[in-house]
């Protein structure tokens, strides 16, 4: 579509400083784009007011632990008026919200200071309650301070309980350990308070994003930095300082890998396992423990931050700083890769697709080309079937999804695209022929979305592959990133179209149901589309398309049935199901209250730790999978230690994946039952 470039509108500036941009300008431009091009635009009315009011407050104060009831009561005068304000280009209400929010963050610091000066009992007959739902706002500052004290005490007692499983030993030294923990917990709370502080720019961005989400969960506001960070997730080459980060068991941000040839690599200082303590950019310092993860990720991922100073701590305790500069590097974590897997006497191919990347911004390769290369490698190795893994793949380029689908089916329609004006377009594979015709498995789960679902749909509709795993996310909509004006500094990621299967059905909202369902830890906790209040609903198009679906030979249903029986009797699958039955209640309702005494907290902590230990051990169970690297990759690794190390980690992940083990069983059955 053509990009809409809107002329600047004149709005009253007397509500804001002379040099400060009026947020109503931005909202008006965003809304103009939405009303003109969104798949299903909604009017600016009282429904929007109520949604934006409640959602914005919940994003500012997720747990209802900053505001107090009288402040919310005062803001409620705006609840049904926001639509009128926006229609009249009057954003003075945001000043009320920002002033109220700033007051809460200042009070948070002040109350922590007051608590520090008061006697702090290390035991109480009171209880704490945990719930997925936000609690009612405290009625006044006194009650809020009391709630903070209870939460602090619980964290102190939990900190002590985490030190050992020997309750008697902890009890014997409790006073000393508790006082040390109190100082540590208080410092963490004070430090974290910095992440609650929002600049006006950050505050407005949050409001713009909330406004966009009213129309659907995937329409969003992007700054230039946000856009750059987003493209980093769907590109095979990115601007990078040269390291990958991971969160440790202690919630510390540590270096997971160093990329050869990068700034981090040539610094000759940074090692795997070093803990990142702070990042400095220009005149701003961001301490990892105190700053929002979003800000740290923005600095690391966005091309807007070209140079920064990083402070690390080595395992020896040595603290050092290093200045790094970004350069375009291959993003190994976001690239397609393959392995050869052995089952019995047969070999099968495994191809992992982390995202549907294309040549966005710094990208130099595309997912369809890279998959084609891996398929040719595997064919040279004589594999008898291929597994394509798009689990946890949130999508990316729809053009690449079309090209990838075309590699495995002959010419024909793949989907129907419909925009908000009911204009339809048939998306087709225009190229005759395929690069591979053998048995195929496609693996999906609750994080498989958008372009991933498009590909899985096509493979299922053409009877080209058996789909295994778990119900997909349910996002059958397409977005494009559009600048809101000629300045190209602010953007909207806008939902323009929905795609439908060639049968006319859609997986929007409901997701794709796999041919073979396989138990997965935390499956019900995956945030699927039907959990979003503003998600587009499912519907069906009336279409009549001709396509050459591969004929059923009777073996597929037998293979699926054998797999289902095998899963029902599998010990690991039963363990996962049993664990999910314990996990689900923890997320679905309120947990029993805990009395703020050490023995009670110790019992709760150890009970939860035992469960998480079992979950971790189960997730790391090695499956009956024999991994063989293809000859080309083995040759490349002779000269690339980083690639060799990366492939060892990838092999470990495959070895612990029950879904891959069952995929191999299914492919083996396909050979056995082949007519």
Image: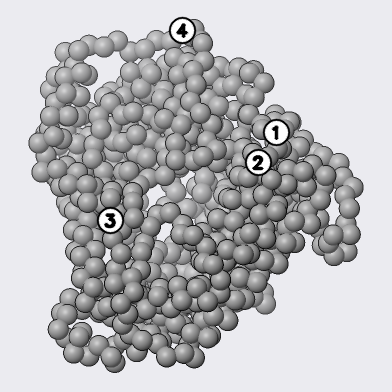
Residue placed most toward the observer, 599 or 473: 599
10 Å neighbourhood of mark 2: few (<14), some, or many (≥20)? Answer: some
Name the side, left or right, on which 278 lies relative to 10: left
User: How far apart are the two marked residues, 3 and 4, measured between alpha carbons?
Assistant: 45 Å
Residue 392: name its quadrant.
top left
Spot occupied by residue 399 in the image (x, y as percentages of width and height): 54, 30
Secondary structure, mark 2, is helix
Which comes sooner in the sequence, label 1 or label 2? 1
Secondary structure, mark 1, is loop
10 Å neighbourhood of mark 4: few (<14), some, or many (≥20)? Answer: few
Q: Which residue is mark 3?
A: 648
Q: Which residue is mark 4?
A: 546
Q: Which residue is mark 2?
A: 48
Quadrant of the frame with the C terminus: top left
User: How far apart are the two marked residues, 1 and 2, measured between alpha carbons?
Assistant: 8 Å
10 Å neighbourhood of mark 1: few (<14), some, or many (≥20)? Answer: few
Q: Which residue is mark 1?
A: 43
């Amino acid at each position: 579509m053509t990009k809409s470039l809107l002329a600047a509108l004149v709005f009253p500036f007397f509500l804001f400083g002379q040099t400060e941009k009026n947020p109503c300008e931005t909202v008006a431009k965003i809304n103009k784009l939405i009303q003109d091009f969104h798949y299903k635009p909604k009017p600016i009315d009282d429904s929007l007011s109520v949604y934006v009011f409640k959602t914005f407050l919940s994003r500012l104060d997720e747990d209802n632990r900053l505001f107090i009831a009288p402040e919310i009561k005062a803001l409620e005068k705006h609840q049904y008026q926001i639509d009128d304000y926006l229609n009249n280009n009057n954003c003075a209400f945001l000043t009320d919200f920002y002033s109220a929010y700033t007051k809460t963050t200042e009070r948070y610091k002040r109350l922590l200071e007051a608590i520090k000066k008061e006697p702090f009992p290390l035991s109480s007959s009171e209880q704490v309650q945990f719930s997925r739902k936000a609690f009612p706002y405290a009625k006044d500052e006194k009650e809020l301070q009391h709630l903070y004290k209870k939460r602090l005490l619980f964290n102190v007692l939990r900190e002590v309980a985490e030190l050992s499983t020997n309750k008697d030993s902890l009890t014997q030294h409790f006073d000393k350990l508790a006082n040390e923990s109190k100082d540590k917990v208080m410092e963490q709370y004070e430090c974290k308070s910095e992440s609650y502080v929002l600049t006006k720019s950050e505050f407005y961005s949050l409001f713009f994003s909330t406004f966009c989400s009213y129309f659907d969960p995937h329409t969003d506001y992007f700054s230039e930095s946000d856009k750059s960070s987003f493209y980093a997730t769907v590109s095979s080459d990115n601007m990078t300082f040269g390291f990958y980060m991971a969160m440790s068991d202690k919630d510390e941000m540590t270096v997971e890998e160093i990329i050869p040839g990068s700034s981090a690599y040539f610094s000759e200082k940074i090692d795997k396992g070093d803990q990142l303590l702070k990042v400095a950019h220009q005149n701003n310092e961001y301490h990892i423990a105190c700053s929002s993860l979003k800000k740290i990720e923005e600095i690391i991922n966005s091309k807007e931050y070209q140079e920064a100073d990083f402070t690390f701590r080595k395992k020896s305790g040595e603290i050092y700083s290093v200045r790094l500069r970004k350069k375009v590097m291959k993003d190994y974590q976001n690239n397609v890769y393959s392995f050869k897997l052995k089952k019995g006497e047969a070999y099968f191919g495994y191809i992992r697709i982390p995202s549907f990347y294309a040549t966005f911004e710094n990208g130099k390769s595309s997912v369809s080309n890279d998959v084609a290369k891996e398929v040719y490698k595997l064919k040279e190795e004589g594999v008898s079937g291929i597994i394509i893994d798009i689990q946890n793949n949130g999508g990316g380029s729809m053009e690449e999804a079309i090209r990838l689908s075309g590699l495995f089916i002959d010419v024909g329609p793949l989907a129907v695209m419909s925009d908000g004006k009911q204009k339809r377009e048939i998306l087709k594979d225009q190229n005759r022929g395929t690069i591979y015709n053998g048995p195929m498995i496609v693996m999906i789960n609750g994080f498989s979305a958008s372009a991933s679902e498009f590909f899985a749909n096509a493979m299922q509709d053409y009877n080209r592959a058996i789909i295994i795993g778990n119900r997909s996310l349910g996002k059958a909509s397409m977005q494009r990133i559009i600048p809101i004006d000629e300045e190209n500094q602010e953007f909207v990621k806008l939902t323009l179209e929905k795609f439908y299967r060639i049968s006319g059905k859609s997986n929007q909202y409901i997701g794709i149901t796999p041919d073979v369902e396989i138990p997965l830890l935390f499956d019900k906790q995956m945030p699927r589309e039907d959990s979003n209040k503003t998600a587009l609903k499912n519907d069906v198009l009336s279409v009549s398309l001709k396509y050459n679906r591969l004929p059923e030979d009777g073996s597929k249903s037998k293979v699926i049935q054998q797999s289902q029986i095998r899963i029902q009797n599998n010990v690991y699958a039963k363990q996962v199901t049993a664990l999910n039955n314990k996990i689900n209640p923890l997320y679905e309702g309120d947990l029993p209250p805990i009395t703020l005494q050490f023995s009670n907290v110790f019992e709760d902590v150890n009970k939860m730790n035992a469960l998480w230990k079992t979950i971790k051990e189960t997730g790391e169970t090695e499956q009956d999978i024999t991994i063989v690297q293809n000859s080309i990759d083995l040759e490349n690794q002779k000269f690339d230690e980083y690639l060799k190390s990366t492939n060892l980690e990838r092999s470990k992940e495959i070895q612990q994946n029950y879904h891959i083990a069952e995929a191999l069983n299914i492919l083996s059955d396909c050979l056995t039952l082949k007519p």
